[in-house]
Amino acid sequence: MSDITKQSLTELVENIKNKNLSSTDITKAFIERSEKSKELNVYITDDFTSALDKAKKFDQKPNLDLKLPGIPMAVKDLFCTKDVKTTAGSKILNNFVPTYESTVTENIWNEGAILLGKLNCDEFAMGSSNETSFFGNVQNPIDKNLVPGGSSGGSASALAGQLTPITIGTDTGGSIRQPASFTGTVGLKPTYGSCSRYGIVAFASSLDQAGPMAQNVKDCALLQEIISTYDPKDSTSIDFKRNQYSKKLNNNIKGKKIGIPKEYRVDGMPKEIEDLWQKGIQYVKECGAKTIDISLPHTSYALPTYYIVAPAEASSNLARYDGVKYGFRAKGENLIDMYEKTRSEGFGAEVQRRIMIGTYVLSSGYYDAYYLKAQKVRKLIKNDFDEAYKKVDAILTPSTPSSAFKIGEKTDDPVSMYLNDIFTVPVNLAGLPGISIPAGHDSKGYPLGLQIIGKAFDEQNILNIAFAMEEKINFKNKITDWWIE
Amino acid sequence: MSKNSAEYLINRKDNQYEVVIGLEVHAQVLSESKLFSTSATKFGAEPNTQVSLVDAAFPGMLPVINEFCIKQAIKTGIGLNAKINKRSVFDRKNYFYADLPQGYQISQFKDPIVGEGKVILDMPDGQKEVGIERLHLEQDAGKSIHDLDPQNTFVDLNRSGVALMEIVSKPDLRSPDEVSSYIKKLRSIMRYLGTCDGNMQEGSLRADVNVSVRIKGSKEFGTRCEIKNVNSIKFMQMAIEYEANRQVDLIEEGKSIDQETRLFDTKKNETRSMRSKEDAHDYRYFPDPDLLPLEISDKFINDLKNNIPELPDDKKKRFIDEFKLSPYEATILVSDIDTAKYFEEVVAKMGKNRDMKLAVNWITGELFAVLNNKNLEISQSPVSAKNLAILVNLIKNGTISGKIAKTVFELMLDGDKDPQKIVEEKGLKQQRDPKAIEALIDKIINDNREKAIEYKSGKEKLFGFFVGQAMKASGGKANPQLINEILKKKL
């Protein structure tokens, strides 16, 4: 049984279609491994009993035309799931059970997948190490006491630890790509407007985007074609022609022009990251692509811009968690007192920090200097990419400036924590698609990722490049099952 | 001094003060569903029965613009002769309150859907133009109910997310009467357009009133106070009157006026401070990232423009030109769309040989009196336009006298009866046979010989006595003109 959980999504689907495996076999295997993996703390809420029922039901009348026939999977706890508790990693939603389903998860269930449970994440997706979750740290399967990255840390750990064959996360400033990089998995942040935000607990509306996480590029492409749909319920959803990404996946990238932005060579970047990047450049060249040095001159402003725009939107998006309608409510002397106590007790420190930053930058007298200025810089950052894409088809960068760090290492230093997103944040600000693929290991044996950034709506192109590189890199994740009880 | 007899000034020993008023009118958009959700908007439904997940701000819920509400706002803008902005932006106005589920209201701040326009008021001493600053769309909040329980406040979210148009006037109004006229005109225009029902009792139309005072002739504006959420014309007038006098008194005492938000206490007839400028909320407006800027094409606007019905000002002009009504009569008839409709239907049913004057008098006289008495809208009139037209025609062609017509009208009230049938059934047809009238008059003269002699000797006042007697004898049915003629001959 144990090798079931080692299979990729593509293999599992094939085995179901060939009737080598039933949905029940697969679901049982993932549940059993999950039961033995409590130490990773990936689940906030499991739905195993119900998952087994659904698997049995599927097997009674299997519809093998579906893309995810009877495939069990767990999802980040930021997606609202009907009748299954959805917390966003926060105490303030600890008792919240939605009566509705997010469009992205709905799309997945419509293709036959079965919900295993809800995965741990940073509180309201605010964090880069999964340490801000009310439900505790998540362990990285790579090594004990190593963070899995964040905010989709539970998703990345569950995937790397083979507790779910595929998963979905959300990415506001790197929350899919950075944990993918830290766990040796593949994560795609689609173009803004590609996946509906309907039913996803909002962090920063103009940056949030759901995306697939998988063990390989092909699985990632398949999941992307399932979750990306035009949705009139989200006014920022864009009605563009979406590909059957997995069917059109192609490793021929001969003649593609790949940009190498000099501004991503940041001060203090470890040599092994630079080396990895050079290796990446070598790989794409070996695949027949050309690399071109480009400049994205406003890159250094991306992080400060992000830390104005995202908290500003968050401060307003999180105003609804006030104890009045649903979720946690503290007792108060009066309405204002109830608000203050509910929000002080219900939100963790990082969320409170960002609400305060956001409130500050939107205040009258500061709005022009911060929020408005940040919006202008955001436009400049987008223009940088537009200019670059006149010369190149895609851009190659490291995913993160370092490999995974130890739990607790950066919790007292928010700025050093924020710096982790330095390569991923510009992509969100520009609304572009970006994919992180595992590309090597550092001296400690921890995985490192490379990021391929594409033109808007050009997911197919970066998937193809990633697919071609994946073959060359031939990455093997070093998972020892150290946590298995 | 004042060339304007209706000028509203506040007099103190040495000074005359002018009152400057600007209004922010909140008009509920007439729409089946809310501004950003598909919930119903019906007034008076059971609490919390018209609330969607979006209205209650559940996690992950997103607003989607209701196109119909956009059309309604643009139509209103056209009715206000205003500039329609092809690009407008929805912003978030952030504040905490129990009946504001999102923790922000979606409104329009820097870029409203409608820009500057104007409204013409018909005042007793002529027309007055009032500038419109802007019209923007926003969501209404829910309703907090404080009086159901001594400990708790209840919240009804039925109103949460309902579309409002905030219509901001320039500070062009100068008296409570002008304010009344302005509100009525706005209401009339929106009712013509079908964009707001203007029902103030149900809160579909309410206003924040900005009041300041200044020495007459001064060019500078005084410090203004904003009186929040006044929901009747009468209260607006009372509030302005109180507030203007309060401000004048402060100035006369050498004190200064604080810019502040005030409440009007309808029981005590006074305004009270709600919060000062220092305590004003910082709403932290910023563009709502859940909604893209609203872009409207010329075609979209023109299609709406081409389907705008005739509005009160144009209708009034037409009534004067086409029906030869006086400006006064025309103003009354166009002020409410249902009255105008009723009148036009009467005109149409009267046919070619119509008496417009008579029709106007009957509508504004008898009919209005009945509606007033019974507290009915003209749309609920017990007498249909068709039957009123028949009645007017019966008078016009001499079938009945005006006096008999009043009797017939009374009978029509019960079940909108056909006046023709009433006249026939009750035998109320006018007596027009000269021979019969002659016989009748002969008898009266005979019975009143002495009075006839007095009349002949010069007591001409007695003529009326004979007319009255003749009328009485005919049961009111004799044609008064014939009575006159025959009496003159006989006496």
Image: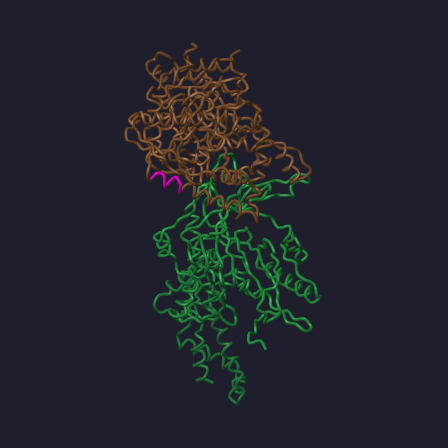
Chain colours: A brown, B green
User: Picture quarter containing residue A242?
Assistant: top left
Q: Nearer the viewer, residue A474 or A232?
A: A474
Our reading of the magenta stretch's main secondary structure is: helix
Tell me the quadrant of the picture where the N terminus of chain B can be found: bottom right
User: Picture quarter containing residue B259?
Assistant: bottom right
User: Picture quarter containing residue B44?
Assistant: top right
The number of callouts visible is 0
Position above or below: A101 against B370: above
Q: Could you tell me residue A59's position as x and y percent?
A: 39, 15
Residue B295 visible at all: yes
Q: Check the image and name the residue furthest to the bottom.
A: B457
Magenta residues (range): A383-389
Q: Is residue B397 magenta?
A: no
Residue at position x 48%, y 79% in the image:
B443
Q: Check the image and name the residue furthest to the top.
A: A1
Residue B56 visible at all: no
Q: Nearer the viewer, residue B99 or B489?
A: B99
Q: Nearer the viewer, residue B433 or A417?
A: A417
Residue at position x 39%, y 27% in the image:
A278
Q: Could you tell me residue B252's position as x and y percent?
A: 69, 67
Q: Is residue B443 left or right of residue A280?
A: right
